[in-house]
Every structure is written in structure tokens, then in C-alpha cells.
Image (spheres, rainbow, N blue to C red):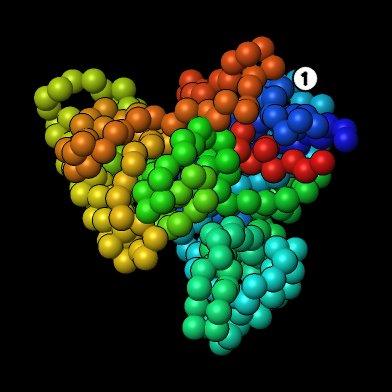
Amino acid sequence: MSSSRVIGLDLGSSSIKAAQVLRDSDGTYVVEHQAARQLPKGVIYDGHIDPARRGRVSSIIAEMFETEKGFTTKDVIFGLNSSASTFMDEVTVPLMKVEDLPVALPVVLASINPSFDPKDNEISFSVVGVVEGERGRQIKVIVFRALATYVKEIAEVVEAAGLNVVGADFNSLAALRAIETLPRPNRQADAVIDIGANVTTLMLHHNGVPKYLSLDPDSAGSVATAKVAEALGLDDDDDQAEFEKINNDEQFGLVSQARNEYSKNLAERVARSLSNAIERSDEIDSLASVILVGGGALLAGGSYFLKEEFGSVPLSYAKIDPSITGKDGAIRRQEPGSGGDYLVAVGLGTGATL
């Protein structure tokens, strides 16, 4: 079996991150090159690219790949991260081969939701396991779907930059592939919290298998920026508010108060959402850990309020899975000034197949 490589492309609200990942024949991964470029403010919001500035985004992507000499392929898997255009459904289907699920799942979704049209959706899925149902043994599946128009929108921008789109995936699933997961006993799950500029993603997983996914735009990093702007008497889109939110390290004052108000509300919303998900679940009883992902997780004071909410449950920043290494032995995590983390880009890059 030969090796294969692909570039994971994470189009965030403030920057574009790319990671070229080599998958070796033994199933391990090597991150060969990483690069990031900042985006003009407001070009991407809730995962969608401003129609009037899609050409600008294509130009930025093209410039990055022309300038950075470490990229040796043009095959790209890009990420999807819109709270309005992505969905998750948990379904059960008759016992069948996994390779038959792509054909069966659209039929199942249409039977549950009469307005569902396969032509309007792109889907991926994760098999939870075999369960006993009223009709005997069945397969429980979590289906992730995105509006086809949304996927096409991004694909056209990426292809206009001269790249070859070979796939798309949900940012949350990509991050889950890239982070280190520890074996947990049955009925115990880990929580992953990804605080992005426009949406906060919450996920519960058991040993790397997704169990729950929620996208919450009302606790995103942009909410913190708006609170800082209001406290300082600035416009919401003032770059000074974003700068102060991240760089002002005073423990007291207007910025600190605004940040703490946001962080306290974030922690309460996250804890309530995850608690409700566990209560509704017939598979999960408790949390093993809470893992933070993304640049927003580094906001001063945020971890304090999360620790207050989760008590004795360990809280930590995501670690890269040991099966993924850097070409020089290290993987860059936080790109200075890029407004984001390479974790999702690396995870998207692990979508390469042999």
C-alpha cells in the first residue's frame, strides 16, 4: 500500500489555516507543512463567505499556496462549520453492511422528515453501534448533513484558487480525529468545546465515537467582542474591541468585567447543554473530561468559570493524537495573529485515504 497526502483547509471567520498531512501505509500521519493567512473582517460569517467577496477569498488562498513552498499537493478537504446550514440526526437502521449505509440513510431521513430532499443535502455519518430494538438488532447511526448549496459555495471558492477539492467534512468531526482520546468505560463520555468567533461547538464522544453535537452562535467569541465594545463605547466592528478582548491582561477594569460576564454566561450555557444531553441520553451517565479547542478557548478567565461549572471533572486544552506527528517532530498549534488553531486543519487533512 502506498502513502497518500491531502491538505486540510480550515476557513475560519478571521483566518484561513492549511495543513498538508501525509498518511503512511501503517496508518500514522505526518503533518508536512502548515500555513495561515488572515482574512478581512466580516468576509466569513457563520461559515458562509460573503458573496461579494468570494473572489477575494480565492485570491488569498491562491496567494498562500503560491508563496508557501512546502505544499506539494493541490488535493484539499475543506471544513464545514455553519450553525444555520449543518445538522445532526440520530437514527436507527436495520442491520446491514456499513458500505450500504450511504444508500440507506437518505431513505431513512426522508421517512423521518418528509421535507428532506437528498438532492439538497450532503451527508456523512458515524456508526454508534448495534442496539436491540423493537424489530430486533439494529444499527444506531449519527448522521451529519449540510445543505448542498453551502458545500457548493465553499467548493467553488476553493477551486477558483486553483486547488482540487477531494472532500468536505464537519470541523467538529475533523477536530475529534486530531485530538488525543483516552479509553473510557461504558456510559462515560468526554466533552469537546470549540469556541469559535461565530459559533461554539459542543460535542460528546465515547472513545472517539460522537454521541452528541450542538452548535451555539449565542456563546461564540463575537459575543465577547460585542460586550467589550459596549463597555468601551466602541462600535461592534471596531478592531480595537477585538484587540482589547485578547490582549488586555488587566484583572480589573471595563474589559475584564465584560470578558468575565461573557465567560460566566458561556460556562453556564455549555454546562447546561451538556448536562441536558447526558440526562436525555440512554448511553451516557457521566463526563470523564472536558477538552477545550480553538483560539477562543484561550480567552482570559474562560477556564476559571468552566472549572467552576464542571467541578471535579478535569478540564484541559486539546492535545494532538500521538499517531499524528510533525515532519520536524513538532506540530504548530497556535499561529500568532491568525486568530485560530491548526487543530481542525490537521484533522481535515487526516481524511486522506489509501
- Using residue 73 as the reference point, say whether residue 64 is left or right of it: left
| Figure quadrant of the C terminus | top right
The image shows residue 47 at horizontal and vertical percentages of 53, 52
- Classify 140 as above or below 309: below
Look at label 1 and name its amino acid. Lys
Q: Residue at x 49, y 53 (%)?
A: 210
Q: Residue at x 37, y 53 (%)?
A: 187
Q: Residue at x 59, y 15 (%)?
A: 330
Q: Quadrant of residue 76?
A: top right
- Classify 327 as above or below 208: above
The image shows residue 221 at horizontal and vertical percentages of 35, 42
Q: Quadrant of residue 248?
A: top left
Badge 1: residue crowd in 10 Å (few <14, some 14–19, many ≥20): few
Outermost residue toward the left in this view: 252
Q: Is residue 294 visible?
A: no
For mark 1, what is the residue? 69
- Using residue 50 as the reference point, say whether residue 231 is left or right of it: left
Outermost residue toward the right in this view: 1
Q: Secondary structure at mark 1?
A: loop
